[in-house]
Amino acid sequence: MVVNTEQFDQYLTEPELRGMQILIGALVMGALMFALIVIAMLTGIVDVSGTVTVQIPFTTLAVVVIFATFAGLYASVVLHHRIIQSQFARTASVDTGTWQHTAGRQLNAIRTGYILQFSVIEGIAFLGLVFNMLAAMNGYGLDSWIVWTNFLPTILLILRIRTAFPTRERILELHRTYSRLN
């Protein structure tokens, strides 16, 4: 069943929108709070002297973070697109009874796409942050290129939230786009 964007806008209530925003915001805030702890360790605000140092190939880990960041960013966008596109194609070809039921399935697809997109990026951000925590325990500071490389996924997570946070306008635009594709 086809649901036009005006119908979808009626279905997208404030509680639905707010719930999605809280969920995505919580994903990002978890990484940002952890980043503050890591920054405190790297700057010496939190004393990590006396912790056990481990021989870790930090240059190799930084390269892993670079590859994981770009692979994860690509995967998150592809997952977001495929989840939404497949569900919209399914709802366009099946009579679900009412437009409200179809709109609900489409909103669930958009929500799932957002969750997958941000959780993939968040996971890679945590990887870089854990590597930075280990680096701080091994004497690295904010003056190290390795540390800044490991912050790359967290920086991209912040940039992504600025460009893709689920606002009513962005969700309606996604609905328009994927409705046209099917």
Image: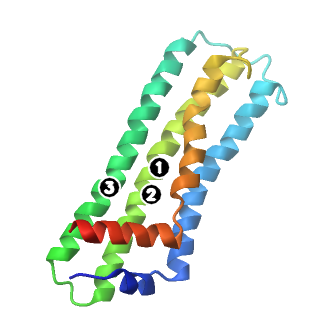
Residue at position x 14%, y 75% in the image: 93
Q: Which quarter shows the N terminus? A: bottom left
Residue at position x 38%, y 48% in the image: 77
Are there few (<14), some (14-19), or many (20+) residues within 10 Å of tag 1?
A: some
In contact (CB < 8 Å): disc 2 and disc 1: yes
Q: Where is residue 34 in the image (x, y as percent from the top left)?
A: 67, 41
Q: Label for residue 115?
A: 2
Q: How far apart are marks 2 and 1 (CA)?
A: 6 Å
Q: Which amino acid does label 3 sit on?
A: His
* Closer mark to the observer between disc 3 and disc 1: 3
Which image quarter: residue 26?
A: bottom right
Q: Position of residue 40 (x, y in %)?
A: 78, 33
Can residue 130 be seen from the camera position used here? no
Are there few (<14), some (14-19), or many (20+) residues within 10 Å of tag 2?
A: some
Q: How far apart are marks 2 and 3 (CA)?
A: 12 Å
Determine which residue is flagged by label 1.
119
Q: In this view, does 103 lie above or below 140?
A: below
Q: Where is residue 70 in the image (x, y as percent from the top left)?
A: 43, 33
Residue at position x 49%, y 41% in the image: 123
Q: Position of residue 48 (x, y in %)?
A: 78, 23
